Image (tube, helix red, strand yellow):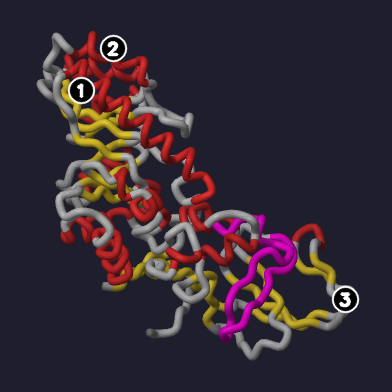
Amino acid sequence: MPKTQETVLEIDLKALQHNFEFLKSKINEKTKFLAVVKAFAYGNDANEIANYLQDLGVDYFAVAYTSEGIALRNAGITTPILVLHPLPVSFKSIIEYCLEPSLYNVKVLNEFLAVASEENQTNYPVHLKFNTGLNRLGFWENDLDYIHSKLKNTSVIRIKSMFSHMAASEDLNESEFTLNQIYAFKKIIEHFETDFGYKPMLHMCNTSGILNYPEAHFDMVRSGIGLYGFGNSDKEDKNFKPIASLKSVISQIHQIEQGESVGYNRAFKSNAPQKTATIPIGHADGISRIYGNGKGYVIIDNKKAPLIGNVCMDMIMVNVTGIDCREGDEVIIFDANHTANDLAHNADTISYELITAISQRVKRIVKN
């Protein structure tokens, strides 16, 4: 690979394919696969990734917000798209772009029914989200009778799926809680079948659910973080390939003396002569201030160089004392060998937060 000359996020589509095929190997061939591509495909490039996954045969996509679904449609995605957190202000746009809303409480159900009626829709596909313990979004089981009363005499919408979301599927110490969630969802399904006389498509498992709870695969599974290379445990991480590498360069090297400070607020003061390097990436690019003052590091010449001082908006400074490096040399913030997981854990956060924060001003390079 040519040496990096600026801050870039390299996206490896072959690694994405590996992760997709690994996850597919864990499910029945009749079980559908939904790829979660919200938040720019977890900080990567939603258009490139969704088109690639569409070619690989993904059955469904999911986004958080309507604008994300519209962007995918404009990028050529024809696969069904579930909008996980639609807001009533965007319901007309959902219909215009043939997106499928998750309806999660009485208010959004009634408002979507009203808009779909105004737009003269018949059997418009919707998905009912049920809360089984995450306590974030979702109907309760005792809402089912009301839902039935609202829908039994209308053909404006049709329920394409019912789903729920596991709260702790990655934590086997919480298996009793997760099994109770699965049981609660099955009770909701039975209640629905009694009221409605049929069973729509069912889905509950996220990435860790796919791996840890095969009994809950139902008709479809959903994966986000797994596609991007993380399995939520050291054991499972070995089966995945991180698809993104964040790289930059050394802009300048300084030799500082004992007692000199580095960065804003003089947050770092040297206790001995040191060599520092300045790198053109900062909190405006997604490297949060939490990584400053030694909590974060970069890789230069295959060695860890800890961040010193506060993270600036556009730059970080690192200690390169003892590292053979020059201005213009490549810097790795994270890649497949020095993972976002490792860097995030060092700062007491998670890979999700780090990778989804990478600013859109960082250049994306897609490798096929």
Q: Amino acid at mark 1?
A: Glu
Mark 3 element type: loop
Q: Which residues are magenta?
A: 286-310
**Crowd rating for badge 3 (residues with CA inside 10 Å; few <14, some 14–19, many 20+):** few
In the rendering, at what x and y percent does residue 314 appear? 59, 61
Distance (Cα) linking label 3 and label 1? 71 Å
Residue 40 in sight in this render? no
Relative placement, left or right, of 241 versus 355 is: left
Instruction: Name the disc covering residue 271, or none.
Output: 3
Type of amino acid under label 3: Asn
Residue 138 visible in the picture: yes
Most foreground residue, 99 or 166:
166
Image side of residue 189 versus residue 263, left or right: left
Instruction: List x then y, in percent, for residue 160.
Output: 18, 31
* The label number, if any, that marks residue 193 in the structure image: 1
Q: Which residue is mark 2?
A: 145
Dividing the picture into quadrants, the one containing residue 263 is: bottom right
Kindly identify the amino acid type of the residue bearing the numbered disc 2. Asp
Q: Earlier in the sequence, mark 3 or mark 2?
A: 2
Give the quadrant of residue 364: bottom left
Can residue 294 be found in the magenta stretch? yes
Residue at 23% over, 50% down:
33
Is residue 78 toward the left or the right of residue 293 in the image? left
